[in-house]
Amino acid sequence: MNELLAAYRYLTNNYAQLHDSKRCGCCNCMEIFRPEEIVGWLGLDTLEQMNDPVAVAKQTAMCPHCGAEAVLGDKSGFPIHPNFLMKMNEAWFQRTMIRPKTK
Ligand SMILES: [Zn+2]
């Protein structure tokens, strides 16, 4: 559980971390993708913030597949692996968000 708690912190304000990552995964939909695929970032509300490197580095990624703020990069030190994403999903997201995909 401590590991999942620690990893959860990397799901927000993670622009810099994801910028240095090669792979990342979403703890909500459990897709694995490249950081370049992320197009949505949250956190810049004003023009001043857009020009502030500290504010830029603290943006939060939105998953390109489901839009959740639940993206973890390998630079965090945690495994970007379906089993780990599943554990994160069970711990943090299952009760509050999207239902499992029907096959
Ligand atoms: Zn997702």
Image (spheres, rainbow, N blue to C red):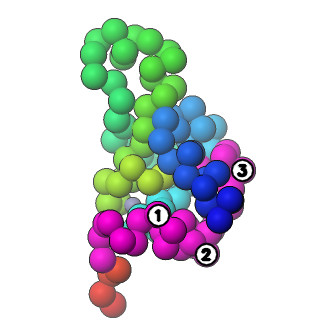
Q: What residue sits right under mark 3 in the picture? A: 77
Depth check, front residue: 93 or 2: 2
Depth check, front residue: 33 or 2: 2
Query: What is the x, y in percent for residue 60?
Result: 43, 38
Q: What residue sits right under mark 2 in the picture? A: 83
Which residue is at a point 48% across and 28% down the rendered structure image?
58
Three-letter amino acid code at the position of disc 1: Trp
Comparing labels 2 and 1, the label whose residue is closer to the camera: 1
Q: What residue sits right under mark 1 in the picture? A: 92
Q: Magenta stretch: give its range.
A: 73-99
Three-letter amino acid code at the position of disc 3: Gly
Image quadrant occupied by the N terminus: bottom right
Residue 100: quadrant of the picture: bottom left
Displayed-image quarter of ligand 1:
bottom left
The residues tagged by marks 3 and 1 sit, at their Cα atoms, a distance apart of: 19 Å
Query: What is the x, y in percent for residue 48?
Result: 34, 9
Precedes in sequence: disc 3 or disc 1: 3
* Residue 29 in view of the camera: yes
* Residue 22 in view of the camera: no
The residues tagged by marks 3 and 2 sit, at their Cα atoms, a distance apart of: 15 Å
Queried whether the magenta region covers residue 7, the answer comes back as no
Q: Is residue 58 above or below residue 2?
A: above
